Image: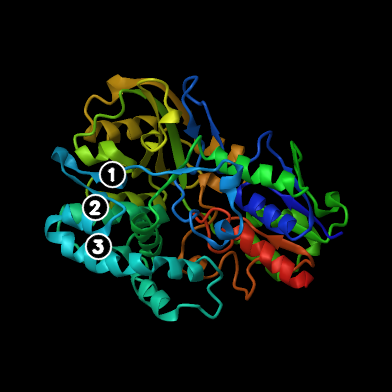
């Protein structure tokens, strides 16, 4: 029987393992940490009974993908839940903007920018299912829907600063700027609109759902399925060399490229090893989990219904904060992404005390404490917030990297979204999953399509391995 070893049990490692096991491969997963899941772990980090997501909280690109269509995790207890408002962006004075599942409903709240929002996102949302079939694969392929992909690509190629000019109001620009900031890139660079366009369109197509019972429910469902397929998982096993794995037919590395180069050592061709060691990581994050009695008293009413809130102020403030972080400076008013997952999944709360997950963009490897800056930003748009905090749990950049070695310097997206890396991850290659070592593949979020499309990197890498096995 064909044998495979998967190093790392994040969503991509588990997706690779499940995809291989479903084809009759004998699979063993090795995880260095005591618990599996990588970026899809959850826990009671503030108070008993309150469930927080450790990293990823919303999964817009996981609902309808090649992996989810092939593997039905609902049979293993995975249930998606949606908030009423997918994401919002509060502004000073109780103003703000919000994105709903419906493009017309969103446009109707944007005043003068309603027509522009409809023109941009309406056609994309109606075709996004076809577009995702193409962009969740390596870009060097013959597209199934070239015209639809071309229209999306024309927007994605723009600098976010240029894309924002399509909107004339502060609300419209801020709503786009907040979602564009998910790229962790300055807005003036080419292709800095790509991530924002993908996530913004997905909000209108699939929504930004949460997993009932926490993101760990995704991990649990995949692990249970893997067990039914005969696969095995071992925790507390840190792999430092390929020699430790025996002689399996397939090795899947759910690791950062630098770690893959260390594990493969002299077996890896020098040119590929150099590319892996030069792999550029993006800025980091500083996280705070809050226990909030009565929820956050946003002055912008739609933010009280939003699963995700971009807490950053005006578009200009978001753009400046991202420039500062990219230049290695910690902004006084950082971009804060805040998750109110309990609005979609009330089981995460305990009575009237609710879990809130927040993180600020910070420079890579930053050693400071952003707790005060995060709380000031939230208090700015929700006066009285601090009075409602009954518990908090912080994680510094160093602690984030220690808990997940793929998050080098606190980079939770496993690689900078530069124009080159958006097209070629982790190196320029026809098959980006190949490591140059026979039978060994890289399957982490450092490979296409990157972070956010949970499971697709692992699924694609497993398909590459299966193809080579015949």
In the image, 270 versus 438, the foreground residue is 438
Dot 2 or dot 3, earlier in sequence:
3
Whole-Å distance between the Cαs marked 2 and 1? 9 Å
Label 2–label 1 contact, CB within 8 A: yes
> Within 10 angstroms of label 2, few (less than 14), some, or many (20 or more) residues?
many
- Between tags 2 and 1, which lies in front? 2
- Where is residue 321? Give x, y as percent: 32, 49
Q: Residue at the location (56% across, 78% down)?
A: 141
Quadrant showing the N terminus: bottom right
In this rendering, the answer to whether 20 lies above or below 372 is below
Q: Position of residue 224 (x, y in %)?
A: 67, 42
Residue 270 percent across, percent down from the top left: 73, 68
Q: Which is nearer the N-term, disc 1 or disc 3?
A: 3
Q: In the image, is 336 to the left or to the right of 227?
A: left
- Percent from the top left, x then y, of residue 405? 62, 44
Residue designated by label 3: 164
């Amino acid at each position: 029987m064909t044998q495979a070893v998967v190093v790392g049990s994040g969503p991509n490692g588990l997706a690779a393992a499940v995809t291989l096991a479903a084809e009759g491969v004998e699979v063993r997963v090795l995880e260095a940490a005591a618990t599996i899941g990588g970026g899809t772990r959850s826990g009671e980090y503030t108070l008993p009974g309150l469930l927080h997501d450790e990293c990823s909280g919303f999964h817009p690109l996981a609902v309808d993908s090649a992996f989810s269509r092939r593997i039905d995790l609902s049979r293993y207890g995975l249930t998606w839940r949606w908030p009423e408002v997918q994401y919002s962006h509060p502004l000073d004075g109780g103003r703000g903007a919000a994105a709903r599942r419906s493009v017309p409903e969103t446009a109707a709240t944007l005043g003068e920018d309603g027509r522009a929002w409809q023109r941009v996102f309406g056609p994309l949302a109606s075709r996004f299912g076809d577009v995702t079939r193409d962009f969740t694969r390596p870009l060097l392929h013959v597209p199934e829907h070239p015209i639809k992909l071309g229209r999306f690509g024309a927007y994605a190629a723009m600098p976010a600063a240029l894309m924002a000019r399509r909107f004339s109001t502060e609300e419209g620009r801020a709503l786009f700027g907040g979602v564009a900031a998910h790229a962790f890139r300055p807005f003036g660079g080419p292709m800095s609109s790509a991530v924002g366009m993908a996530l913004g369109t997905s909000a209108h197509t699939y929504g930004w759902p949460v997993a009932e019972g926490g993101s760990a429910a995704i991990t649990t469902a995949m692990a249970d399925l893997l067990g039914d397929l005969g696969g095995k998982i071992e925790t507390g096993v840190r792999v430092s060399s390929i020699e430790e794995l025996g002689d399996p037919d397939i090795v899947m590395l759910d690791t950062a490229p630098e770690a893959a180069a260390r594990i493969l050592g002299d077996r890896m061709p020098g040119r590929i090893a150099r590319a892996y060691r030069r792999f550029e990581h993006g800025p980091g994050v500083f996280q705070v989990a809050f226990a909030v009695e009565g929820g956050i008293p946003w002055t912008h009413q739609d933010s009280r219904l939003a699963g995700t809130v971009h807490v950053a102020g005006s578009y200009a403030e978001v753009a400046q904060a991202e420039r500062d972080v990219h230049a290695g400076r910690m902004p006084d008013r950082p971009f804060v992404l805040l998750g109110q997952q309990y609005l979609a999944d009330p089981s995460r709360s305990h009575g009237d005390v609710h879990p809130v997950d927040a993180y600020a963009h910070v420079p890579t490897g930053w050693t400071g404490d952003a707790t005060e800056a995060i709380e000031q930003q939230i208090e700015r748009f929700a006066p009285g917030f601090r009075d409602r905090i009954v518990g908090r749990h912080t994680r510094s950049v160093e602690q984030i990297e220690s808990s997940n070695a793929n998050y080098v310097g606190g980079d939770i997206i496993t690689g900078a979204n530069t124009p080159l890396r958006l097209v070629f991850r982790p190196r320029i290659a026809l098959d980006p999953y190949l490591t140059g070592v026979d039978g060994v593949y890289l399957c982490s979020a450092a490979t296409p399509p990157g972070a956010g499309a949970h499971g697709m990197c692992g699924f694609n890498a497993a398909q590459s391995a299966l193809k080579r096995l015949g």
